[in-house]
Amino acid sequence: MTMWVAVLVAAGIAFALKLVGHLVPSTLLDEPHVKRVTAALPIALLAALVATQTFTGSDGGLVLDARAAAVGVAVVALLLRAPFIVVVVLGALTAALLRLAGWA
Amino acid sequence: MSALDSGVRRQVWRQGLSVGVATGAYGISFGALAVAAGLNVWQAQALSALMFTGGSQFAFVGIVGSGGLAAAPAAIAASSMLGIRNGLYALELTQLLGVHRLRRAAAAHLTIDESTAVAVSQQDERASRLGFWVTGLSVFVLWNLMTLVGALIGNALGDPKQWGLDAAACAAFTALLWPRLKSRDAVAIAIVAGVVAMVLSPALPAGLPVIVAAAAALLAWRAPKRSVEEAEA
């Protein structure tokens, strides 16, 4: 699979999911269990992404480095209600400075 | 149908545009992260123009960034699972918008967190429609513009790690998750998913642990009715 194929397939599925919701009858998702699980899906996926992006090295092994510090700073910023872009920039800045200082 | 009160109209426009500017601004971080993950500028741009749903885009480049092309199937699966919620938004919006054919396809493409949030928070159906289109279109234009800026900057920066761009991705996922952690059940699901993903990481190829950990969402099956729905941002 080339990167272009992956990009276009993923984009096509994303659009299809949006379109399907506009075309199917809305009673389809009245089942409350299904509704709850689909609402919880982004939570599980994003948490798993935070965990793997932050704590795994290039070989998949667990590591603790500048990225963990960056997430710590991001959480503090979020507690202080900082907007998304500020949180992201602070995360990058934290890791960049720690690496510049040779600490992580 | 009488015209929308001009005060309400102005308020909806202001709301939609400000959401567009705020959301569009972080398109710059997406663009930079996408090229850091190994996509070229056009591929980053294609994701913003054609996929156009931030969480899924970040997930796609995050997984491809750590696992390369071999992780592409996992990247597609993760971005698609995150995109399911847009389909749920669409179920609610389609009644509200009352559009057909080409406009319905356009509305589908603009069905994202932000346009839905602005549309459903209006008091009146016409205000909802206006809010949906103003928000959706302004996010689309600015998100794409800022993606290009971010991708060009990312390309010029060189080594992404030196600038902390890998950590920026971690911070971005944390910020996307944060507003959803509104109930104890949501927090529990997040912790289970995070732990499962970490435990599996050394054993499975990059990307796959995320997909397996998504099964933690099944914990919501038995949760009391309100708790998880409250967490739906």
Image: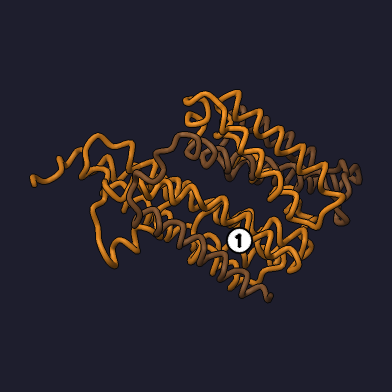
Farthest residue, direction left: B2
Query: Residue at 46% of width from left, 62% of height from top?
Result: A15
Which quarter of the figure is the N terminus of chain A placed in? Answer: bottom right
Is residue A47 shown left or right of residue A57?
left
Residue wearing tag 1: B31
Element class at badge 1: helix
| The one of A82 and A34 positioned closer to us in this rendering | A34
In the rendered structure, the colour chosen for chain A is: brown
Which quarter of the figure is the C terminus of chain A placed in? Answer: top right
Query: Residue at 69% of width from left, 55% of height from top?
Result: B62
| The one of A82 and B1 positioned closer to us in this rendering | B1
| The one of A21 and B54 positioned closer to us in this rendering | A21
Horizontal and vertical percent for residue A69?
79, 37
Horizontal and vertical percent for residue A37?
54, 38
- Chain letter matching colour orange: B
Q: Mark 1 lies on which chain?
A: B
Badge 1: how crowded within 10 Å, few (<14), some, or many (20+)? many
Horizontal and vertical percent for residue B9?
22, 43
Horizontal and vertical percent for residue B31?
60, 61
Is residue B76 shown left or right of residue B16?
right
Query: Residue at 47% of width from left, 25% of height from top?
Result: B226
Farthest residue, direction right: A102
